[in-house]
Every structure is written in structure tokens, then in C-alpha cells.
Amino acid sequence: MSLRVNYRAANPGAFKAMMALEQHVSGQFEDKPLYELLKIRVSQINGCAFCLDMHAKDLMKLGDYADHIVLLSVWREVPLFTEKERVMLELAEAVTLISEEGVPLELYEKVKEHFSDAEVVDLIMAINTINSWNRIAITTGMYPGCFNK
């Protein structure tokens, strides 16, 4: 298996721009496990193996989150996730699948119960950033370990 194109080498400026966005967004999150859960869930929805692998490993480095990773795709069905995590996951799904139902006002109101206005913007930016990374990775044929060869 090989990459369709190594976007990092083919267009370093595009990679630099994405990294700047990533660095800004990641710097806004004090709750790093929440941030990694967001990235994993969006990557699951989009089917991005590269990002799933990376962010699951990143979350495991933060502590014992194996149950969170294993059960993330069925988060609605298990009591493992906090209310704040559930609201974030629901928002992540709505924004990722925005063409289906948009972001309902009821969901936005639930989000506001757990996050400030600035944090809501951070969440939206984080969701959009990982969606962009997923689309780059899938389109260019990235897979776990592809840059380690």
C-alpha cells in the first residue's frame, strides 16, 4: 500500500497552514482527553484509519482510556461518558454530519450548559479541523504508519 500523494512534501505550505490551525485549536483545550475523544469520534464517523490510530494512541498516553476508545462508537448506550462528554460528542456528530440535520437549537442549548461561548467556538473549530485532517488523509490514501517507511 502506498500514498496517492505525500501532501506534506508536495505542498509544504498547505501542511504548514493546517498545522497552524491544529496548534491553535489544540492550545485552547485544557481537557486533553475530551479533545482526543472528539477527534476519535469524528474520525470514526469519517472512516479515517490514520487519524483513528493516531488519536487513540494519543488518548492512551493520557491515561487508562481503553474503555472510552472501545465504547466510543456506542457512547449513547453506555453510562461511561460524562454529561459534558456526551454533549460534546453529540455536537461533534451534528457538525460532522451537518448536511443531514444541521445543528438543532436544542443541541446548541445543551452545549451552552457545559461550555462558555469561547469554548463553543473552540469545539466548532476543533470539529472542523479534524474533519479537514480526515478528508486530507482519506483523499491522499494515508494509513497508519505510512510516514514511518
Image: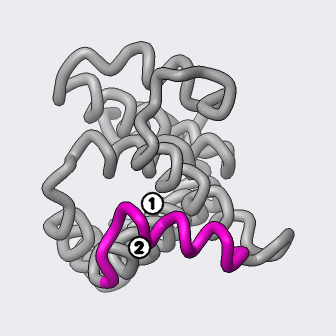
Q: Residue at x 85, y 69 (%)?
A: 100
Residue beneath disc 2: 10
Residue 3, percent from left and from top: 55, 49
Q: Quadrant of the C terminus?
A: top left
Judge by depth and name the residue closer to the eye, 49 or 37: 37
> What range of the chain is rendered magenta?
103-117
* Marks 1/2: CA–CA distance: 6 Å
Give the left or right position of residue 107, taking residue 19 as reference. right
Q: Secondary structure at mark 2?
A: helix
Residue 43, percent from left and from top: 56, 47
Residue beneath disc 1: 6
Q: Are marks 1 and 2 in contact (CB under 8 Å)?
A: yes
Q: Residue at x 38, y 30 (%)?
A: 56
The amino acid sitting under disc 2 is Ala
Q: Is residue 114 magenta?
A: yes
- Give the dominant element type of the magenta stretch: helix, strand or loop: helix
Residue 80's place in the image compared with 8, above or below, is above
Q: Residue at x 42, y 66 (%)?
A: 113
Give the left or right position of residue 75, taking residue 112 as reference. right
Residue 98, percent from left and from top: 73, 73
Total marks placed: 2
Q: Secondary structure at mark 1?
A: loop
Q: Quadrant of residue 29?
A: bottom left
Give the left or right position of residue 94, taking residue 64 as reference. right
